[in-house]
Image (tube, helix red, strand yellow):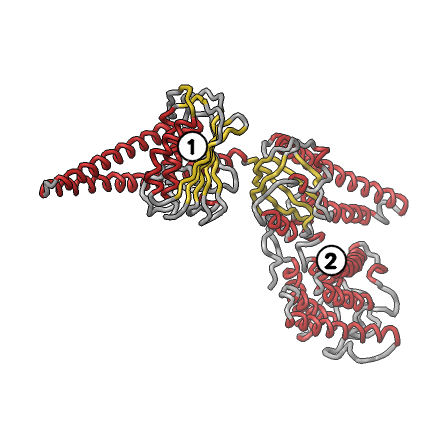
Amino acid sequence: MNNNTKPVPGRLPAVNVSLLAAATTLFAAGLILIGWVFDIGWLRLWQADQVSMKVNTAVAFLISGLLLVVGQWKLTLTAVVTRLVLCGLLMLLVVTTLAQYLFDLQINIDELLFDAPDEALMTSSPGRMAPTTAICFGLFAIAVLLDTKRTRLGRAASRFLATVILLIAVASILGYAFGAPTLYLAIDGVTAMSLPTAILFFTIATGVIWLQPRFGFPAMLTEKTVVGTHARSLLPMVVAAPLFAGAAVMAGYGELYEGRFAIALTSLGSMIAAGIVAAISIIVLRRADEALNLRDRALAATTTGVLITDHRQPDEPIMYVNPALSEITGYSVSEALGRNCRFLNRGVENEPGVLQQIHDCIAGENDGQFELRNRRKDGSEFWNRLSLAPIANYDGTVTHFVGIVHDITERREQELRLEEALENARKASAMRDSFVRLVSHELRTPLNAALTWIRLMEIDDDDATRTKGLKIVAQSILSQSRLIDDLSDVSRVASSGIKLESEKADARVLIEEVIEELRPSIESKLKLVVDAEPGDYDVMVDPLRLKQIVRNLLSNAAKYTDPGGEVSVRLAIEAKEVLLSVTDTGKGLTAEEAAQVFEPFWRADSKQPGLGVGLTIVAALVAAHDGTIDVSSPGPESGTSFNVRLPLNASPDARGPLDVEQDDGQSGKAG
């Protein structure tokens, strides 16, 4: 069976009219055949004073009922072949019957199953069906075959032929109802259509129309819309009113009044019927107008953006927008109408594939929900949660799409802030773990060295051992002191900032003092080159902090340069700034590592000793002096260069927490 009876949203509960028509036809035709088999006159609907249904007609109705049953099947090869066989049998009856009328032949098909009485009323030949009956069966067979196409054209042609059968059947029924034999072809020499035949033709024609109930008139009649409600309200009046008017006129015709009065009475009855139909139409339309007006007001009042596009047009133009959408996008109603929704996406970067997903949703006539960026009229961007839903007409064809627009910018920004907070929390946790690990290691190393020599001096009081041991213990204490100082500086950078004790000083003198201090340790394994251009290097600085900057840069360069390499220091005046460049021929780093060079506790090589805070402190001190620092490296194993610039007319002051930014493409290392 097909799924024609499956409930459709927005429609009344489905009733399989075609199957009901098939059952009625099979039952009635079966009873009539039983009447012929057992010669039961009332069962075969034959009386001497009325037209009877012939045996061939009953057989043809049995075939017709079976065709309506097969019409419920899915269009498989078996279903199509079965339709063709049954239609072939039906057309064989039709062609042979019409051939006898047209060419005055006697094929003896009329009494093939049973002998028919010669005195049957309005019968040209015993057992022969009426020509109109044969024609209707032929039209029915063609209509059923056309239904197998399941296309709009095939459906329209099938229903047109079924409508012709309906009209012939109704004409015959009215002929019997109002005593007009001409309507059921009661002409000498021609078999007339019987009343049961006309009723069953009305039944099977209705069954053909309802073979595809989701399309055309059946769908319109069952849908929960203004049109459906109107059609259901008017259909009884359209059918019943003329019949009642005709019956009323017929009841008094000939006895109470004659022709002219009957015509006038018929006109009056028609006017009354038309007035009732018009009144019902007005009531239904008034209610529909109130419902539509209520929906319009609801759409206008909602804060959610709503738009409707015309799916019948190639470019899916907008045909409706509510005020909320205009408020969200900044485009007025007139500016949005007639345009494709793509104008909201121009110049906006969205996640890969989201626009294609929307296109596929519309092309496939499906519903869906998407989140994308759109651009307002003023150029600002907003996040849009777009819900799309197709709207189909009464025959199931999608004609429009409804889009619901939700401005979720605030929600997305909150999610982004939450993600950033979580990422910062993860980084802080990782930094804490790294800090604990590094501090533990850096504190333990000098303590272990000092403890070892103290124990050695306890068992060996040789002067040389004692002298060397005291020296190492002193170095360990100094190392611990520097470690504590570095941690204190990092803490200040992260909280209240580093406070300077500024004074006017010669930067060249201060820098050279540090160079000479570190020269022995550097030149023990590296080549040290110093290039100091002549000039006035007087600046407002904190002398101790400036020395700390130079000391950290030189120590960092020496740490990451292999023995035999070179560390060069350049000092110059450029653009009213003191330029200090420290360059080495060491490891160098990638661009990715440069982005982390000034981050606390980051080290280019975890095997090197240190906390990884030296360059963090340097950046903070340079910023505190209103200076800048940048780092560059050609790449791994190509050395690194740090450039510090301090203004000659600086007025250093206490700085807040440091936020050091690096230009793209920079690289460096920290120790």
Name the residue furthest right.
260
Q: Which residue is mark 2?
A: 152
Q: Is residue 222 left or right of residue 194?
A: left
Q: Nearer the viewer, residue 61 or 159?
A: 159
Residue 449 percent across, percent down from the top left: 20, 42
From this viewpoint, is residue 169 visible? no
Residue 11 at what x, y percent from top left? 62, 48
User: Which quadrant is the N terminus positioned in?
Assistant: bottom right
Viewport quadrant of the C terminus: top left
Q: Provide residue 372's location: percent of width, then percent of height.
A: 58, 42
Q: Is residue 399 above or below residue 63?
A: above
Q: How far from the left and from the top, in percent, is residue 641?
A: 46, 40
Q: Nearer the viewer, residue 562 or 58?
A: 562
Find residue 521 and report its image quarter.
top left
Q: Which residue is mark 1?
A: 619
Q: Where is 29 relative to 305, above or below? A: below
Q: Is residue 542 above or below residue 223?
A: above
Tell me the amino acid under the disc marked 2: Arg
Does residue 400 appear anywhere in the picture?
A: yes
Q: Foreground residue, 148 or 247?
A: 148
Distance from Cα at disc 1 to Cα at disc 2: 77 Å
Left/right of residue 447 with respect to residue 181 in the rendered view: left
Q: Nearer the viewer, residue 328 or 597?
A: 597
